[in-house]
Amino acid sequence: MTREPVIAYVALGANLGDAAGALREAAQALARTAGISGLRCSRLYRSAPVDASGPDFINAVAELRTVLTAPDLLDALQAIETHAGRLRPYRHAPRTLDLDLLLYGGGRVASPRLTVPHPRMWQRAFVLVPLAEIAPQLVSTGQLAAVAEQAIEPLEV
């Protein structure tokens, strides 16, 4: 039986190495992943680390259509992170690539491994600004105003 596609949103971030290149490669890897289609990405943004250390992050948000379940999509995201050299030496460590499942259709997931909607997405300008760029209907002006003090700027490439 074929599943109906779901629109999902994924946050992309990196702050080690060629972070902008890592996000572009991750977007290409997502587009090549079986069960994913219709990938659209926001511009790249630079932001200071939030609850993390290291250099500034480069961030984006991708919209995609998928027939994968939320846990299977998480597996695909983590495989792409691993391929990019992602290590997890400690919580909030600097990273070569970080892919977070933000939204999975209108679904909710609460498991030890995955929480959707992402529990902190509404508190982070580096998620809300690029999300509002590609899906303005999902982000209110009030939500953007609540994170306005967090520094974020479009990356000139």
Image (cartoon, rainbow, N blue to C red):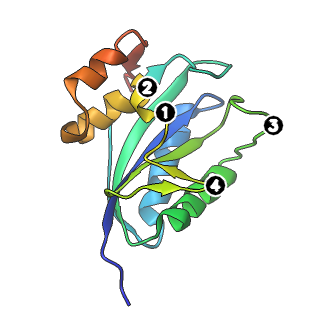
The residue nearer to you, when weighing 91 against 59, is 91
- Amino acid type assigned to the residue bearing label 3 in the image: Pro
Q: CA distance from mark 4 to mark 2?
A: 21 Å
The residue that disc 1 covers is: 120
Disc on the earlier residue, 1 or 3: 3
Residue 89 is tagged as 3
Disc on the earlier residue, 3 or 2: 3
Q: CA distance from mark 1 to mark 4?
A: 15 Å
User: Is the C-beta separation of discs 1 and 2 under 8 Å?
Assistant: yes
Q: Is residue 44 visible?
A: no
Pair 1/3: label in front: 1
Disc on the earlier residue, 4 or 3: 3
The residue that disc 2 covers is: 123
> Where's the N terminus, which quadrant?
bottom left
Q: Quadrant of residue 41?
A: top left
The residue that disc 4 covers is: 113
Residue 72: give x, y in percent of width and height: 54, 67
Element type at mark 2? helix
